Amino acid sequence: MTAFTLGEAMTTALTRMGGRKRIHASAPHCPGAPVRRGSIEAGSFERTFFTVPAQGETDRLLRIARRTLDTGRRLAREERMGTRRLSHRERAITALTAGAVRVYEELLALAKLNRGQVFPSYDHLAKATALGRATVARALNQLEAIGFLIRQRRFKRIKVQGAGPRYAQTSNAYRFALPKAVIAYLPRWMRPAPPPDDVIQADADRREVQAAMLSRLSCRELSQATLSGPLGRVLARLGARIDALERESHHDPQPRMDSII
């Protein structure tokens, strides 16, 4: 079975669990711990998050980022001249800086070296690019806003004596993408070729078969099939409890009000 992304798995699992008390599907969080919103425990999701770049993919993405930098400067110049009104996406492109492209170059180099497993700290990026931490932070925001990368915050467990937080923020994980917003501004030779019709149909058939298979699973089986690690085990236990409640409701169903004479 094709592996789901973390977001797809969480959405599917929570949809199947609808109608009950709302469940927060984030990773375990200790009240008061210095962990940012949306963080996931390191080591629990990377297997399905990272992807190995194809041959030449990192070089191609870097060329596109540099071309996008030139496009952003042209769009900004046209806006200043009053000949163009920028859309929201175009405004994000004009915010791209040379420093952001340099940070992107370093991230792509790490992806090529580490087979797509990219999780550098801000300090590493600042040292490798000779930029300040604040500049690196702004660069990552610019790249994420355009769609050049997907960033996932992470936290890790720490050992402490006595009372206090048991979790701490650690470096982010990064995955790369070709943003749809920039494709229209690329020359034809840099645009990705559309997939053949048979590939599109095969992908649609695969998704249909996969959805049918998952629809027949219980909540516990669905969690085990789509997620692994600590988060998957937590959802599996939660799904087992929901399955048990549903079985109990089948054995002792509530009488229908309209059936009482």
Image: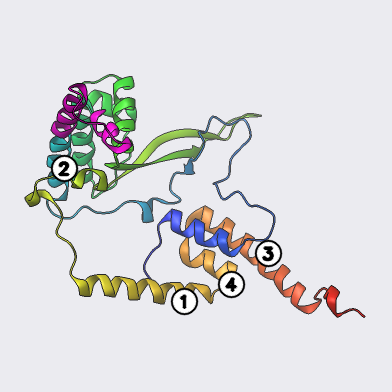
Q: In this view, does 60 lie above or below 128?
A: below
Q: Is residue 103 visible?
A: yes
Image spot of residue 220 (x, y percent): 58, 67
User: Which of the two discs, 1 and 3, labels the residue nearer the N terminus?
Assistant: 1
User: Which of the two discs, 3 and 4, labels the residue nearer the N terminus?
Assistant: 4
Three-letter code for the amino acid on which mark 2 is drawn: Tyr
Is disc 1 in contact with disc 3, using a CB cutoff of under 8 Å?
no
Q: In this view, does 11 lie to the left or right of 97?
A: right
Q: In this view, does 84 lie to the left or right of 19?
A: left
Three-letter code for the amino acid on which mark 4 is drawn: Ser
User: Dot 2: what SS?
Assistant: loop
State the image quarter where residue 32 is shown.
top right
Is disc 4 in contact with disc 2, using a CB cutoff of under 8 Å?
no
Three-letter code for the amino acid on which mark 3 is drawn: Arg
Q: Mark 3 points at which residue?
A: 241
Residue, x 54% and y 46% (percent of image)? 27
Q: Which of 28 and 11 is in front in this view?
A: 11
Dot 2 alpha-carbon crowd within 10 angstroms: few under 14, some 14 to 19, many 20 or more = some
> Marks 2/1: CA distance?
40 Å
Coloring applied to the structure: rainbow
Residue, x 23% and y 46% (percent of image)? 114
Q: In this view, does 240 lie above or below 79?
A: below
Q: What stretch is highlighted in magenta?
A: 69-95
Q: Name the residue under label 2.
A: 185
Q: Mark 1 points at which residue?
A: 213
Residue extending farthest to the right is: 261
> Marks 4/1: CA distance?
11 Å
Image spot of residue 233 (x, y percent): 55, 58
User: Which of the two discs, 2 and 1, labels the residue nearer the N terminus?
Assistant: 2
Q: Can residue 255 be seen in this view?
A: no
Q: Name the residue under label 4.
A: 218
Dot 3 alpha-carbon crowd within 10 angstroms: few under 14, some 14 to 19, many 20 or more = some
